[in-house]
Image (cartoon, coloured by chain):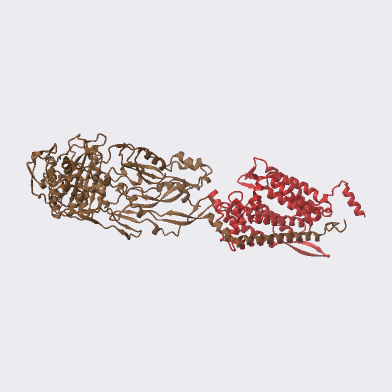
Chain colours: A red, B brown
Amino acid sequence: MNLRFWKKTSEAPVEGQTMFVEHRYDRWLLALTLILMSVGVVMVYSASIASAGASFGDGAHYLKRQLMFVGLALGAMVVTMNLHHDLLRRLAKPLLVMAVLLLMVVLLPGVSATAKGASRWINLGPLRFQPAEMVKLCWIVFLADLLSRRQAELDSFRRAWGVPLAAMALLGGLLMLQPDFGSTVICGGLMLLLVWAAGARWLHTLGFIGAGLAMVPLAILAEPYRMKRLTAFLSPEDDPLGVSFHINQALISFGSGEWFGQGLGNSTQKLLYLPEAHTDFIFSIVGEELGLFGGLMIMTLFGLFVWRGFHIARKATTAFGALLAFGITAEIGFQALVNMSVATAMMPTKGLTLPFVSYGGSSVLILGASVGVLLNISRQEPPPAWMHRLIAEKPKARRVTSSNRRLAAKGAA
Amino acid sequence: MAGNVFRRRGPVEPGARKGRMLVVSILMAGLFLGLIVRSWWLQVERHGHFADRSARQHRTTVTLRAPRGPVFDRERTLLAETAMWPSVYAVPRAIENPAEVTAKLKDILPVDEEVLARRLSSDKAFVWLARHVRPDVAEKVEALGLTTVAIRPEPRRLYPRRNLAGALLGFAGIEGSGLEGVERDLDRYLQGREYTVEALRDGAGRFALPTGGVPMERLTGYGVVLTIDARIQQVAEDSLRNQVREMQAKGGVVVVMDPHNGDILALAQTPDFDPNAFRQAAADDWRNRAITDTLEPGSTMKPILISAALDLNKTRPDSVWNGYKGRMRVAGFTLTDTHAEDKLTTLEIIKYSSNIGTVQVAQRIGREAYHRYLRAFGFGELSGLGVRGEQVGTLRPAQTWRPSELATMSYGYGLSVTPIQMARAYAVIANGGNLVQPRLVQSVVDGQGKVVEAFKPRVLRRVVRADVTQAVTEGLVMVTENGGTGRRARVPGHAVAGKTGTAYKVNPLTRKYDHDMIRTSFAGFVPARDPRLVIYVAIDEPQNEKRYGGVVAAPVFSEVAREALPYLGVEATEAYTADDSFEEIDEREHLGPEAQARPWWFEAGLLTGAPSHMVVPDLNGLPLADVVRRAAELKVRVQVQGAGLVVAQRPSPGALLPADGVLTVVFDRPGTDDDHAATLAGAQ
């Protein structure tokens, strides 16, 4: 394994002569990631100092843990940025199986940690692991692999949508058993986005978007707490001490920031008023302490991150790399947008973290690994020789089906 | 299907994928733009609204009280001060294993293990475990290194001289308001001023109080400088305590006063108590006996009568009176004197404490004149000491006196006086004829010791001529000379003027004078011809063999004077005279009324003001509402002090209270109180 960080060269044959091509990591993306994580560490400390002090008698409790998680995440990033991403093609199916298994394990009463009626964590002694974060990455890898292999067949409804829909049904079902509505929506959205971006037909995609939107009211009606969140969202000042307490506190926090905020560390809402100030609602504290200026800074960082991510996807040498980079970037970008929209009451409460910034071990760890994959794609390096054997697709005997026959007939014509 | 824009044939070109990514980019850019507009709307346009809501929910003004001011004696010795004292609190909500914490604390804190366990296992964010613990206890708690149990300093009232002047000082409750004595009566000076601070309140309802920025030195209560001299007070208390113990008496009072300006130099009493631990003392001991004990004075009243007669020119100091050889019949009963004399002069009436003589003097001036002079000497009126609870005593109008009563009044029965009144009356004789208002508070000072308010000595009125007081003083000096009843009051190097008193008390149960209940007293001043100290000593129900004022009370006078005069810089003027043996002299006094006599005025309720007594109920631990209800049932007037639950009452449960008497009930909050805790708890 080559652990050199910044550049890597490989021999590239060009028009009969031998030259060396530099394979650079995308320094922009790396820098943005490190800045976002640093901002996150600072904001987690600021937002959690009061609640950590009240619960653990140590105001730096969450800071210490977040620093440890960031360290682990950077380790994971170093590993994934140096492993060629094509290896993931080989691992796509096992990873999805693993994700499904994790989602089953989390439902077991003995191993799961339950919070607020949802069992979303697997207890690992002093640490807790949230499989949903892992599942999102595995889902993107699986879809990118599947779709890249079927580039030529995406016009076909069945070839494009069949497997993703079936897998989504399984994942969605398991996620809703926790229940984790936010992650289900994200996974479903990612599926639509990736299949469509890979080349599926507009008509099919729009049809699914319509069907997905139609599902939302049903899902909301199925669970009373979602209904509450929706009412809280629609009329936040009706019941400021009841269902709308959370969103009201978030708005009070965010709105009292003005242009430059109260100053770092000067939030008063974090004094046990705003629940989950250091996790899902950290953007409200950013708004309160650093103002519109601080919020714009965070948004700019994410904007630049998405731009670099899409840039990497556009420049990717393989369809798999392009779809993987696109999927990862879109996931991070949309999750950030949704989180910030929730904090500013543009969307009902979801339970999604602000990537890189929010406190959370599983989230930060998976994000580190994801950014590592993005960086690896950005190098545009062909897979090393030892990997060819692993990733070479074995020729598969195909059953003759009606659609095969139709394609064959078309090819003949 | 030709012309359908959504229909595209053939494999996807890389360009198409890139185009779709661009669509997503534009979508995201749009969302970001929306987010920016929304942020601007919330944070800038609507900022006022949210900032206001934010302030409303976590800014609050908390009203706090600054510490109490100190109490000094006349030499600025500290008698009471406020110090920061450690209190132990816990954050039960954060305690994972209350049993373990309880086990660690149970041997350190002076709290019951069960109480401790209950407080630690509650779900509160703050609870006091023990307030005002000793510093070494606080150190031990800190040494445990628990994160959920901590120390917070709280102001605590301390009385560094412990029992010294305890009943006079009284005490303040745990919340810093005066409940008894000087602490209560001078509360308006001593109490720290209230101030409001802008505090942050956190989501759990706790307060984070700003530590600096409060001009505490300007808010702390004023200091009070008393006229008490701690050294004299100490001598008076020690001497009184020893004598009471020796005589197996029930109690006693000593008043030491400056005759010229009325300064109270000492107010000692037994039993005493330590205001640091006032809860451990019987509530009845809290009362300041010098102003609340009203008793028939007995023979100490005689010099007042003689002064009146001399001032009216009805007699001269050397006039001779018939002694009737110790037996005289007057108004239907027979008077006897222990000193059977044939003839005695006016001054010898004082010297021998002759009842027969005083009765004749009283008859000569008449009841109206005698009553007028008693009033002029300050009997039957409040002394104006300024301490709540002072009694006036009883001095009935002259018209209501029966003929026999002029006789008994002349030697001090049938009226009741307080020790402070008696000391003030003797001050009139000592200072040349002026009635002064006793002064307890010299001045009020601020934190730098600057006088804020000074209290001037006040001369109220002229009572008798100076030549009269000179003459009476000579009579009083004779009392302590050979042959007098008060020889034991002598002070080496000084002439002493004084008068013994020995009186039966009325047993409230039998309503008769009781042979076993005797109150001995000695009132006098020293040096006799240039008086600096008036000292009144009363010792209640001595059990020794010779129960006379000259034997029981006079030695205390002597001891206090002997120790106190050097403090005042008074030099010995008289040649030292070694005491003769007391055995030779007759110190007996006639006690006046026959034993077992039933004083009709007592029966009629004229002396005590009530026909009957009631047994005081036990009100301990009751809230105010219950006390009011019980009081209404029993038809007793209640005076309420403090707030919370009853911690003490006066008189004590089971004691006898005249039906129109006032039952004083003291309320205080219990030592640990969660409501109170909320205002004191910090956020961190």
Q: Image check: B499 left or right of A67?
A: left
Task: Examine the rendering and report whether any part of residue B581 can be seen.
Answer: no
Task: Examine the rendering and report whether any part of residue B516 can be seen.
Answer: yes
Above or below, comparing residue B572 to residue A101 in the picture = below
From the top left corner, tell me how far across and down residue B637 is, in percent.
34, 42
From the top left corner, tell me how far across and down residue B159 is, in percent.
34, 49
Pick the front one: A258 or A285: A258
Query: Which residue is outermost to the front?
Result: B399
Query: Which residue is outermost to the right?
Result: A413
Residue in the picture at 90% in, 53% down? A410
- Quarter of the view holding residue B601: top left
Pick the front one: B510 or B395: B395
Pick the front one: B487 or A410: B487
From the top left corner, tell me how far across and down residue B619 is, in percent.
37, 39
From the top left corner, tell me how far across and down residue B8 is, in percent.
84, 57
Total numbered labels placed on residues in the image: 0
Above or below, comparing residue B25 to residue B341 in the picture = below
Tell me the quadrant of the picture where the N terminus of chain B can be found.
bottom right
Q: Image check: A237 left or right of B368?
A: right
Q: Image check: B397 left or right of B85?
A: left
